[in-house]
Image: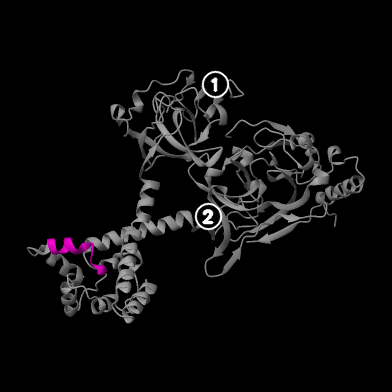
Amino acid sequence: MAARWAWGSAAAGRGTGLRSRFFRHLSHYLIRYATWIPPLIWFNAYVAEVTFIRGPSMYPFLNPHYNESLRKDLCLVWKLYSQEGLRRGMVVTFRNPYDPNRTTVKRIVGLPGDVVKTKPPYPYEYAVVPEGHIWVEGDGDKSQDSNHYGPISARLVTGRITHILSPWDRAGRVRWWEHPLRAGVHRSAV
Amino acid sequence: MAPPCPNFPVRHLSTAAQVNEDGKMRKTDGGRRIDLARDCELFGLVQYECIVRHPELADSPVQCWPVQRWFRRCQDKKGSFTAETTAWEGTASAITPTESAPSEGQGVHKSATTLQTAAKSSKSV
Amino acid sequence: MPSLTYNFRRLLRPGALPRFVKPAIPSPKLSYSSPFSSSPPSSPPPSSTKADSDPSPNEPNGDTKDRHKAGSAPSWLGHPFRVILATLKFVAFTHLLWEYVISMAPASGPSMLPTFEVLGEWLLVSKLHRFGRDVAVGDVVAYNIPINDEVGVKRVLGLPGDYVLMDTPDGGVGGAGSGSMIQVPKGHCWIVGDNLVASRDSRYFGPVPLALIRGKVIATVRPFSEFRWIVNPLRKADGPSDD
């Protein structure tokens, strides 16, 4: 700020030319609007974000036309307190355990204590979901999920998908509680 | 806990070190096999086993015994990787039939004995 | 709070609100509601230079000047609503700095013992290394413990593709050839506390996803007595030396 004063008064000292006024206005607009960038980033990182879903792993729930068009679903991701109160059936976003820079969308299938009957790539037939972990799977067949990388820590969860925004015919709230629970999961009490 | 990954006994380390995290063979210059003893630099790091003598006191004396750990840093075409050789140094697979190996192997054995009588270092909080 | 009540009274005056709202965007004095505006009062008052050098007549600076004649409200304070906004912006900015650049937190527990004491250590954590960016074997990291909701501090002994002992080396004692090893899977790391007998780490819960790494511990501070950089202790050795 002090630097800006110095700049401003120096500009004023050179006279009230067009250039000085231009710079003064420029810096004013820069500062006025640039200061809104941190709150926006903060909101996107910790409260809510609107994002496109890529890939077929949640077919047919999300991106049902992935092989017919390039259209992607637009979703609202709610991030506040997203690691608390996780339930089976919720659609969550989390940092991919194989690549921390990638965010993945899957459905929660098992909670801590559950015994899950696994699907092919997993080396064992049954898996116990450990304390603090969840078992996630995609709705579709083409999904890299817990059957590849095992149960994931609930602390990788960054948000949950609460609304579909973009194709108008499917827009609305995500009723995750109406989704049938996956067969082959011996559920603990939670 | 996360991904299911197989464990292997230390004597298989030389073989396991040929494969990268994607399950593919590591590529090297000339395509030769990575030899941990010959191709990789040795690094050391000390960890400890510490006992707080009087946990009920705020400034209790703490006694620590060092635990030496060894690592070898190797190069492949993708970059470098590290293999912990604490338990591997001095085993039969570490002694390769190359000319430099026997002396190194002896050094390893001697170090194992010195570590047995690891000097006690105490430290007060 | 004379200035605030003054502004509130101005707000309540009939016809004051439109004047307040309309010039809100073009008036340069408003830029001082930025989060950086918490300048000490001793520094030159910005509005005076502004008001003197500002030639544009269509800006309603009359109010500001009047207020300065009244002598109570500094111009950067402005509308009370704006003060709240500026505070919010400032808090968001600092929180982002804290989460993405650098932070400091107290640490306790015996798991890193000779490196960090049991009590009273404050750790300076570089968040630029979050997600394990530029972290090397031997660095100390702060990470989200995968099985509960706490934060731990441990030493990294393996990165993706590295090979580590799954258990404690037997103090180097007759350990040759014993113990099983694993290759750290991609996207994960292997972390072990310095005090091997009192640490719950990868030996207990397995490899930790790099996405759970919050940052690298770069220094430790004991308030008012000690500041110490944390250096990577991994050293090149000629051979397992024997003296």
For residue C162, side relative to residue A150 (left or right): right
Residue C220: image location, x then y, percent: 57, 61
The amino acid type found where label 2 is placed reads Leu
Which secondary structure type mostly characterizes the magenta part of the structure?
Answer: helix
Q: Residue at x 88, y 48 (%)?
A: B104
Q: What SS does tag 1 mark?
A: loop
The residue type indicated by label 1 comes to: Lys
* Magenta span includes C24: yes
Q: Position of residue B12 (x, y in %)?
A: 78, 34
Task: Give above or below for C166 relative to C77.
Answer: above
Q: Which residue is mark 2?
A: C128
Range of magenta residues? C18-29
Q: Which residue is mark 1?
A: A119
Asked whether A52 or A129 is in front, the reply is: A52
Quadrant into which the N terminus of chain C falls: bottom left
Q: Nearer the viewer, residue C224 or A155?
A: A155
Q: Chain of mark 2?
A: C
Give the residue displayed 40% in from the left and 23% down from the top. Answer: A60
**For residue B87, which numbered disc appears in the image?**
none
- On whether residue A170 falls in the magenta region, the answer is no
Q: Secondary structure at mark 2?
A: helix
Q: Is residue A131 above or below residue B89?
A: above
* Place of residue C106 in the rendered image (x, y in percent of width and height, measured from the top left): 51, 57
- Front-most of residues C114 and A8: A8
Say which chain tag 1 marks.
Answer: A
Please give the count of numbered marks on the rendered protein.
2
Q: Nearer the viewer, residue A29 or A38?
A: A29
Identity of the residue drawn at 55% across and 40% down: A99
